[in-house]
Image: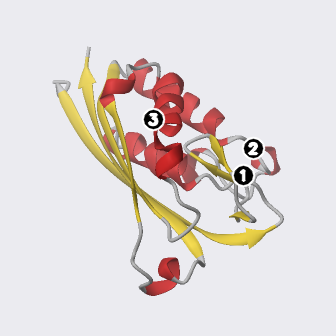
Amino acid sequence: MTPRHRIGTGFDVHRLVAGRPLLLGGVHVPSLEGLEGHSDGDCVIHAVCDAILGALAAGDMGTHFPSADAAWKDADSTLFLSAVADKAMQAGYTVANLDVTVVAESPRLAPHVERMRANLARTLRIDVSLVSVKAKSTDGLGSIGRGEGIAAQAVVLLEHA
């Protein structure tokens, strides 16, 4: 029997480094630093991919897009999200709801949240009303509070068609 609903969670964190663009949710965010990673380092998309893959019980990003594979070097993470969305659709599922929390001390992310929502919805081929993105800080606590990195957490509900 195929479950009508499946829930998945995802988490990703990357170190901030000089000389890289900052991409979050597929949106370029003006910053002097970007996220370190084998691909473009977009921790928002990586967390969403892991949430969908988790809901499908299909492993994680490293299983499908290993950092040891040169094909993914500097890759646009929206390609990963599109492939993961296709995998969900092939299994008969659509995203019923997506909720993402991005944790960063700086830069200020609130002005970019609506574009992140729109980009995630477009890539997942769902209505933007089904996508939530929230920007939070740690009020100076921990490595993220010291400006060393950015993290994202995602929860997704998949619904069988």
What residue is disc 2 on?
75
**Residue 21 x, y percent position in the rendering:** 76, 54
Question: Can you tell which of label 3 and label 2 is closer to the viewer?
Answer: 3
The span from disc 3 to disc 1 (Cα, nearest Å) is: 21 Å
Q: Nearer the viewer, residue 59 or 78?
A: 78
**Residue 80 x, y percent position in the rendering:** 60, 38
Please give the name of the residue rendered at 70% of the width and 61% of the height, measured from the top-left corner: 37
Question: Can you tell which of label 3 and label 1 is closer to the viewer?
Answer: 3
Residues at circles 2 and 1 in contact by the CB criterion of under 8 Å: yes
> Going from the N terminus, do you reach mark 2 or mark 1 first?
1
> Going from the N terminus, do you reach mark 3 or mark 1 first?
1
Element class at badge 3: helix
The quadrant the C terminus occupies is top left
Element class at badge 2: loop
Please give the name of the residue rendered at 58% of the width and 77% of the height, measured from the top-left corner: 147
Three-letter amino acid code at the position of disc 3: Arg
Three-letter amino acid code at the position of disc 2: Ala
Residues at circles 3 and 2 in contact by the CB criterion of under 8 Å: no
What residue is disc 1 on?
39
Which of the 4 quarters of the picture holds residue 96?
top left
The quadrant the N terminus occupies is top left
Q: Is residue 1 visible?
A: yes
User: With respect to residue 119, does 40 lie above or below?
Assistant: below
The span from disc 3 to disc 2 (Cα, nearest Å) is: 21 Å
What residue is disc 3 on?
117
**Residue 148 x, y percent position in the rendering:** 60, 78
Q: How is the image coloured?
A: secondary structure
User: With respect to residue 161, does 135 lie above or below?
Assistant: below
Q: Is residue 59 visible?
A: no
Which of the 4 quarters of the picture holds residue 146?
bottom right
User: With respect to residue 12, does 113 lie above or below?
Assistant: above
